[in-house]
Amino acid sequence: MGDHTYKKKDSGIYDALNMLVYDYLLKMKYEGSAKIFFGEAGLGDFKPTEGMPILAQWYAAFHDISAVRSGLSSNAQDLNRIEGIMMKLENEKRRYQRIGRVDPTSMGYGGSMDPYKQYPMYYQPQQFDQRKMYEMYGHVSPPVDATPGFYDPRKVGMGTPGYKTSQGYSRYPRFEDQNTPSTKMPSRQFRDEGRNGSAPSPSMSAAQGNNSPLFESALGTSDRQFGLKEVMTFMPNEHTTVCSVVARDHKLLFIASSNKTITAINLLSGKSESVVETDERQVIEMKIKECEGIITIVCGIGGNELLLVRCIIKESTSLEVFGTLKGHTAPIVSYEVLDSIHSLDSGGMMRKWSLEGVFEREEVLSGEILHICCISEDNFMFADRQRVYVYDFELNIEMMEILKGQALEIKRIKEGFIVVFRNQAIWLDKRIQKVKLLNVNENINTAALIDEDIVAASSQSAWFDNGKSLAKMKLHETNIISLDGVNVFRKPSVVSCSANGECKIWIRYIGD
């Protein structure tokens, strides 16, 4: 690899950056790589310019402050010292920016000029903005007439101009209205075998055109068809199944029944491991957090409270009720469990609890939010009657809009998220980017992922793209209550539970 890969002779800034890379390799004890880099980058005759000390100070201060804030160093004096250094460097950076705006030729760093900006490209006037962390969701260039997209939901209707990004434009919605045909992408039809009708594929935004390698929406892209094959049937009890949830890591299925009990089922054997009564309260929804040897089950029971159930896994599996979350003054409409528990009531009050049930904080939100789903500890997907959007609970601001329409369910899965609309299921990856979607001709109540294929449940049947067309397959004699992806018998599979208490495991098989 030649010198041109690492630097250009005409610009001293490349030498400075190369030296920082070399210093980093040495600090990380990559002596071999550092030696090779030193030779290939031609740093033997490197002569520091006046820009080098600022870069070096930033680099050193970054490592020091990271050590303190990550807990590797707990010295308060170190923290005060590096905070002072950072303040000094920030002031120095702003001074160079002001100089660059007034006299771009006076900066002496050898930086090339951007014809669209009257200052060197290296020192662009961008102030630190904590919202930059949300660039993890990807970058979409906004239109010229884009309106501000950041705002505080509590101030809607109060005439606030909204929050802008540091560049002065708003965040642009990643996806368009799900029912609006795209002008940049031909409509692709999903064919339902045995029907004459078809449902058009929803559109994508210009940022995710039909050349995106991540996005798949068309049927008939495979030469081989896949289907679902039943491998196990079990009925935990004779009572009506109200809801269920799967613990993928422990291969357990938890079923809440109409007799006000929760049953833990071993998915490998189909046998009941433990049963617990729920203190005469009917569980209508369950969400879990899996840890080694213990599973926390947060149960929605209607009204203003949540029930906490613990599943302890040692030599045997045991279920126990260990608490109730109280404090909401209005009925809880949605809740989520990750490293903490977040619950939202119909009055807009969102409360945060630890997994042990200790209250931590609350925030008042505006708007009629119907569903919440954790992206990370303080970042959420909110769904109201018109759209799905990302919200920062810590900063208390909306970050960006994702989808249009009223979502019926947002399910967090191992591979990302599944958002269910009335006739459509969409798979989003962990970066909130659209991967696949499935359109069907009937109302969907839930969906799951099986080996990167979406399976949607409607009444007693499942819908999926079999590789050549849209297929419909009857799974149960009564309505499907839940559908979840699992991995049992070392094969991609889904478990379905119906209202009459029957549960089945289906594996994915490939046929001609």
Image: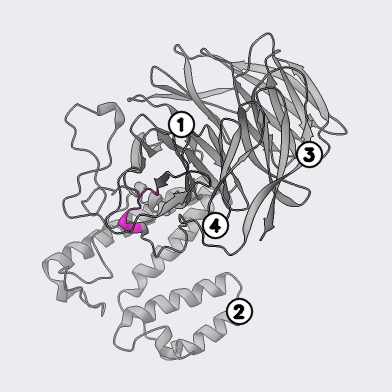
The answer to whether residue 266 shows anywhere in this view is no
Q: Give coordinates of residue 144: x percent, y percent.
A: 17, 55
Residue 31 is labelled as 2
Amino acid on which the number 1 mark rests in the picture: Leu
How far apart marks 4 and 2 lie (CA) works out to 54 Å
Please report the bounds of the magenta region as a residue range. Answer: 201-207
Amino acid on which the number 3 mark rests in the picture: Met
Task: Give SS at disc 2.
Answer: helix
Earlier-in-chain disc, 3 versus 2: 2
Choose between 406 and 188: the one closer to the eye: 188
Q: Give coordinates of residue 337: x percent, y percent.
A: 57, 32
Earlier-in-chain disc, 1 versus 2: 2
For this view, does 218 lie left or right of residue 30?
A: left
For this view, does 435 lie left or right of residue 271?
A: left
Residue drawn at x 26%, y 58% as measured from the top left: 126
Q: Tell me whether the residue at label 3 lies in contact with that at label 4, contact meaning CB atoms closer than 8 angstroms.
A: no
Amino acid on which the number 2 mark rests in the picture: Glu
How far apart marks 1 and 2 lie (CA) works out to 55 Å
Earlier-in-chain disc, 3 versus 1: 3
Residue 488 lies, with reference to residue 92, above or below; the image says above
Residue 468 is labelled as 4
In the rendered image, residue 80 lying in the magenta stretch gets the answer no
Residue drawn at x 33%, y 42% as measured from the top left: 179
Q: Which residue is mark 3?
A: 232
Q: Residues within 10 Å of mark 2 (few under 14, many from 20)?
A: few
Earlier-in-chain disc, 4 versus 2: 2
Earlier-in-chain disc, 3 versus 4: 3
Colour scheme of the picture:
one colour
Q: Give coordinates of residue 360: x percent, y percent.
A: 51, 25
